C-alpha cells in the first residue's frame, strides 16, 4: 500500500507546481497563525479551505489522510469492532476509491469502490468523465456554509456553527438522530451510520477536534487533507485570505479557470471555496444545478419567524379560542338546563 | 353531567376475529422493531443518506396525524363555532385522534437513530427555535397529552357508571376547566399541522417545484382541516356499518362545509404554483405531473359530490367523498415528504422495504386494535337511544 502512495507522491512532484502553490499557501497560513496559546481557535474570523481543481491530480492522498485521522484513529471508532471488510479499503493495493455518482462513473475503471455515500469518509475525491475534455476531479466535503441548513434544521443544537471560526460542528452527545440535517443540507453532506444500532451523523468538521490541538503546541491549525495534499491543491486558512488568494489566481490566469469562484455566493456563501477549470461548471462536478445564491435556511427561518413572532399570533389565537369556547359552553349549559 | 346518555358503551365481545388478525400484525411489527433496535435502521429499511426520511415519517407522522385531525375539527365545530348538535360525534373522533398522535410519536421513536437523547427536547438550553422540527415535536407531544385529557371524560363517565363515586366528582371538576384544554387542543394542531408543511421549505431544490413553496404551511393547514372533516365522516360511516348502528344524520349537514374549504385549498395551491412560476412543470408529461393533478382532482370531485349531487344525503355518498378526500389529501402529504423529494443523482430512488411497510402496518393495526377495544369498554360512540333528542 505504501508503494502506491509513494508512487503517487513522486508523480505529484513531477507535476511540479508545488513550488508555486507551496509559497502562496504559506502566505495564507501566515494570516491564520493564532497568537494565543490556547489557540485551538484562530481568532481572526471564519476559516475555510480553497480547492483548486486545476492542481488536483486525483491521487486521493487527502481521502486517505482524512480516513485515517477521522475514522481509523478517532476515539469513538477505535473501541468499536470494525469488521475487516470495512477496514480493508485502503489495504488492497489495486483498489482505487475514485468515485462519482453511479450514473456518471467512469465505466472504463472496473475497480471503482463506491465511497461517496459511505459514513467512513468525510472527504471524497470524485471523478467525472466528460466526452470532450477527458475527466475532472473534484474534492467533496462539508462546505461549512455561512448560513448552514443543517444548523438551522437541527432541533437540539447538535449541529452548530462556531461563532469564532465558522466551523460547522456536530455533537453526538445531544443528537437525536432525526436526520433533518440531511434533508436540509443542499450538498447532501451529513452521513448517517445506517447499519449501526448506536448510529451517529458523520461529517467533516475541519479536523477541529482531531488536528487543531497542534495549534496549542505552536503549530498552525491544519486539516488532514490540507496537511497531506502533495499538490497543495487544497489549502487551509482564513476565508477572506483564501478568497483573496483565489481572486489573485483568477486574475493571473484568467484563461485557466471558470471565472466564478464556487462558494463565494452560492447558498449565501460557503467556507470552503472552489476554483474550477475553465469550461467546467459546478453541475458538471456533481454540485446541485438548481442551487443558486438563495439560502433556504434563511428562507425557512423567515417563514417561521413571521408566523411566530414573539408568540403573539399563538397567544392571540389561544385567547380568542378560549373566550369563544367558554362563552359557547356556558350558553349550551344554560340551554340544557332550560330543557 | 349534561351529556350523560349522549354516548354509550358498545355492547359487543372484545375478542373478535378482527381483533385477533390485527393482533398478529402488531406482533410481527413488534418483532421487526426489535430487530431494528438491535441491528440498525439500515437493516430493516431502504432509507439512505439521500432519502433519510421514509414512510415512518412520511406516512406515520405526516399523513397519520392528518388522519388524526378529527378531534381537532370537531373541537372547532362544536365549541368554537357553537354547533353542539355534533357533540355526540366528538368522543369517537378524540379517541381516534389520540391513537393517531400517540402512534405517530411511537413511529418517531422507531425512526430516530439516537432516541435516548430525545430528552433534550425538555432541556431549555438545547432548544433551537429556528428549527421547524423543534416546534413540531413540542407541539405534537403537548397535543398528545391534551388529547388524552380530552378523552378522560369518557373514562370517568364509564367508571362512574360502574359505581366509582370518585370518578363522578373527577368528571365534574374536569368539566369546569375542559374548555381551556380544548382551546389548546385547537391551537396546537393549527400550529404544528402548518409547521409540518414548513418543515420541507429548508430542503429547497430537493422538493419538486410543484410542491416547494412558501405557502407550504398554509397548504398543510388547509389539508389538515379537509382531512379532519373527511376522517370524521369516514369513521362515523365505518362505525355505522361495522358495529351495525343507525346512521348518524348529523354527518350530512357537517359535510356541507367541505366544498368551501376544498375550493379554497385548490385556489391557494394554484396561487402558490403561480408565485413559484411552476405552471410549466404542471404540464410536462411525467408521473409527478399526474400525481399533482390527482391531488387536485381528488379534492375537487368530493367537493362537487357534496355540493351538487343528491348522493350527498346518503351514507354511501358521504363515505365515498370522504374516502376520496382522505386519499387525495394523504397523497399530497406523501408527495411532499417522499414522492416529490429528490436529492439529486447518486442515490437509489426510495421505495420502502417490506419490513418498513410492515412496521407501519403494525402501527395502523395498533390504532385499530385500541379503537375497537376502547369503544367496548368506555362510552365513546354516540348513544343510539339518545339520538332523537338532538
Ligand atoms: S455543507 Fe451541508 S453539512 Fe456542511 S455546513 Fe453546509 S449545510 Fe451543513
Ligand atoms: S440528526 Fe442529529 S445533528 Fe442531524 S438534525 Fe437531527 S439531531 Fe441534529
Image (tube, coloured by chain):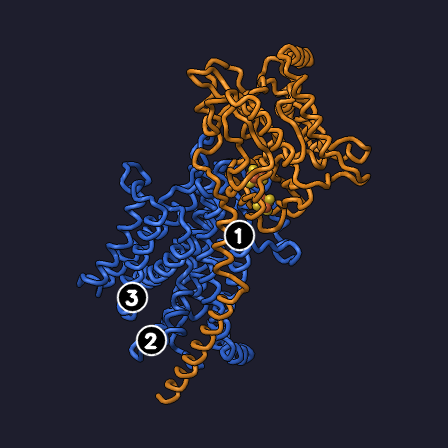
Name the mark on residue B257.
Answer: 3
x, y percent for residue B85: 33, 75
**Within 8 Å of ligand 2, the CB of disc 1?**
yes
Q: Which residue does the image show at 71% across and 33% down from the upper left? A: A31
Task: Say which chain tag 2 marks.
Answer: B
The relative height of residue B146 versus residue A281 in the rendered view (above or below) is below
> Which label's residue is closer to the chain start, 3 or 2?
2
Which residue occupies the extreme bottom position in the image? A338
Q: Which mark is residue B133?
A: 1
Q: Residues within 10 Å of mark 1 (few under 14, many from 20)?
A: many
Q: CA distance from mark 3 to mark 2?
A: 15 Å
Q: Secondary structure at mark 1?
A: helix
- The C terminus of chain B sits in image quarter: bottom left
Q: CA distance from mark 1 to mark 2?
A: 37 Å
* Chain A tint as drawn: orange
Q: Mark 2 = which residue?
A: B85
In this picture, is A146 found above or below B118?
A: above
Nearer mark to the viewer, of 3 and 2: 3
Amino acid at each position: 500500500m505504501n508503494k502506491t502512495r509513494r508512487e503517487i507522491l513522486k508523480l505529484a512532484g513531477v507535476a511540479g507546481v508545488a513550488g508555486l502553490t507551496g509559497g502562496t499557501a504559506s502566505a495564507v497560513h501566515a494570516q491564520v497563525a493564532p497568537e494565543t496559546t490556547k489557540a485551538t481557535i484562530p481568532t481572526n474570523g471564519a476559516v475555510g479551505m480553497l480547492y483548486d481543481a486545476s492542481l488536483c491530480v486525483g491521487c486521493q492522498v487527502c481521502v486517505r489522510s482524512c480516513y485515517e485521522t477521522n475514522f481509523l484513529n478517532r476515539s469513538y471508532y477505535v473501541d468499536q469492532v470494525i469488521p475487516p471488510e470495512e477496514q480493508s479499503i485502503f489495504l488492497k493495493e489495486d483498489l482505487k476509491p475514485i468515485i462519482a455518482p453511479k450514473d456518471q462513473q467512469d465505466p472504463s475503471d472496473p475497480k471503482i469502490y463506491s465511497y461517496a455515500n459511505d459514513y467512513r469518509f468525510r472527504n471524497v475525491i470524485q471523478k467525472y468523465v466528460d466526452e470532450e475534455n477527458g475527466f475532472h476531479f473534484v474534492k467533496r466535503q462539508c462546505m461549512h456554509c455561512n448560513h448552514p441548513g443543517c444548523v438551522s434544521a437541527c432541533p437540539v443544537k447538535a449541529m452548530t456553527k462556531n461563532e469564532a471560526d465558522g466551523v460547522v460542528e456536530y455533537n453526538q452527545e445531544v443528537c437525536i438522530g432525526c436526520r433533518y440535517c440531511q434533508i436540509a443540507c443542499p450538498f447532501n453532506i451529513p452521513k448517517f451510520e445506517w447499519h449501526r444500532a448506536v448510529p451517529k451523523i458523520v461529517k467533516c468538521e475541519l479536523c477541529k477536534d482531531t488536528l487543531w490541538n497542534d495549534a496549542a503546541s505552536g503549530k498552525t491549525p491544519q486539516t488532514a487533507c490540507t496537511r497531506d495534499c502533495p499538490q497543495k491543491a487544497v489549502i487551509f486558512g482564513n476565508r477572506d485570505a483564501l478568497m483573496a488568494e483565489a481572486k489573485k489566481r483568477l486574475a493571473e490566469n484568467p484563461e485557466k479557470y471558470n471565472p466564478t469562484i464556487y462558494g463565494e455566493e452560492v447558498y449565501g456563501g460557503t467556507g470552503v471555496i472552489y476554483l474550477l477549470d475553465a469550461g467546467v461548471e459546478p453541475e458538471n462536478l456533481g454540485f446541485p444545478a438548481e442551487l443558486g445564491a438563495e439560502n433556504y435556511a434563511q428562507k425557512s427561518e423567515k417563514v417561521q419567524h413571521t408566523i411566530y413572532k414573539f408568540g403573539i399570533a399563538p397567544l392571540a389565537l389561544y385567547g380568542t379560542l378560549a373566550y369563544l369556547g367558554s362563552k359557547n359552553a356556558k350558553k349550551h349549559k344554560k340551554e340544557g338546563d332550560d330543557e | 353531567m349534561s351529556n350523560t346518555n349522549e354516548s354509550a358503551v358498545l355492547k359487543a365481545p372484545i375478542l373478535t376475529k378482527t381483533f385477533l388478525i390485527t393482533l398478529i400484525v402488531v406482533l410481527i411489527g413488534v418483532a421487526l422493531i426489535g430487530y431494528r433496535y438491535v441491528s440498525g435502521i439500515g437493516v430493516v429499511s431502504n432509507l439512505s443518506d439521500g432519502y433519510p426520511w421514509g414512510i415512518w415519517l412520511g406516512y406515520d407522522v405526516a399523513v397519520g396525524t392528518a388522519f388524526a385531525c378529527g378531534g381537532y375539527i370537531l373541537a372547532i365545530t362544536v365549541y368554537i363555532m357553537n354547533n353542539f348538535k355534533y357533540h355526540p360525534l366528538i368522543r369517537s373522533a378524540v379517541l381516534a385522534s389520540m391513537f393517531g398522535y400517540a402512534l405517530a410519536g411511537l413511529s418517531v421513536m422507531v425512526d430516530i437513530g439516537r432516541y435516548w437523547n430525545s430528552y433534550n427536547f425538555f432541556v431549555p438550553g438545547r432548544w433551537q427555535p429556528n428549527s421547524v422540527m423543534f416546534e413540531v415535536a413540542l407541539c405534537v407531544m403537548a397535543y398528545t397529552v391534551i388529547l388524552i385529557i380530552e378523552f378522560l371524560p369518557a373514562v370517568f363517565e364509564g367508571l362512574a357508571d360502574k359505581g366509582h363515586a370518585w370518578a363522578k366528582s373527577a368528571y365534574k371538576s374536569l368539566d369546569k376547566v375542559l374548555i381551556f384544554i380544548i382551546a389548546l387542543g385547537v391551537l396546537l394542531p393549527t400550529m404544528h399541522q402548518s409547521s409540518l408543511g414548513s418543515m420541507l421549505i429548508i430542503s429547497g431544490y430537493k422538493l419538486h417545484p410543484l410542491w416547494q413553496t412558501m405557502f407550504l404551511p398554509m397548504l398543510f393547514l388547509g389539508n389538515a382541516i379537509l382531512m379532519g372533516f373527511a376522517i370524521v365522516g369516514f369513521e362515523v360511516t365505518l362505525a355505522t356499518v361495522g358495529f351495525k348502528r343507525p346512521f348518524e344524520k348529523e354527518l350530512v349537514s357537517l359535510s356541507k362545509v367541505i366544498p368551501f374549504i376544498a375550493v379554497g385549498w385548490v385556489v391557494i395551491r394554484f396561487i402558490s404554483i403561480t408565485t413559484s412560476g411552476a405552471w410549466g412543470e404542471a404540464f410536462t408529461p411525467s408521473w409527478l405531473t399526474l400525481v399533482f393533478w390527482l391531488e387536485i382532482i381528488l379534492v375537487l370531485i368530493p367537493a362537487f359530490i357534496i355540493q351538487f349531487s343528491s348522493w350527498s344525503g346518503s351514507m354511501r355518498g358521504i363515505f365515498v367523498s370522504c374516502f376520496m378526500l382522505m386519499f387525495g389529501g394523504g397523497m399530497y402529504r406523501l408527495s411532499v415528504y417522499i414522492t416529490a423529494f429528490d436529492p439529486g443523482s447518486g442515490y437509489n430512488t426510495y421505495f420502502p422495504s417490506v419490513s418498513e411497510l410492515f412496521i407501519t402496518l403494525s402501527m395502523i393495526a395498533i390504532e385499530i386494535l385500541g379503537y375497537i377495544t376502547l369503544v367496548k369498554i368506555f362510552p365513546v360512540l354516540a348513544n343510539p337511544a339518545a339520538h332523537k333528542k338532538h
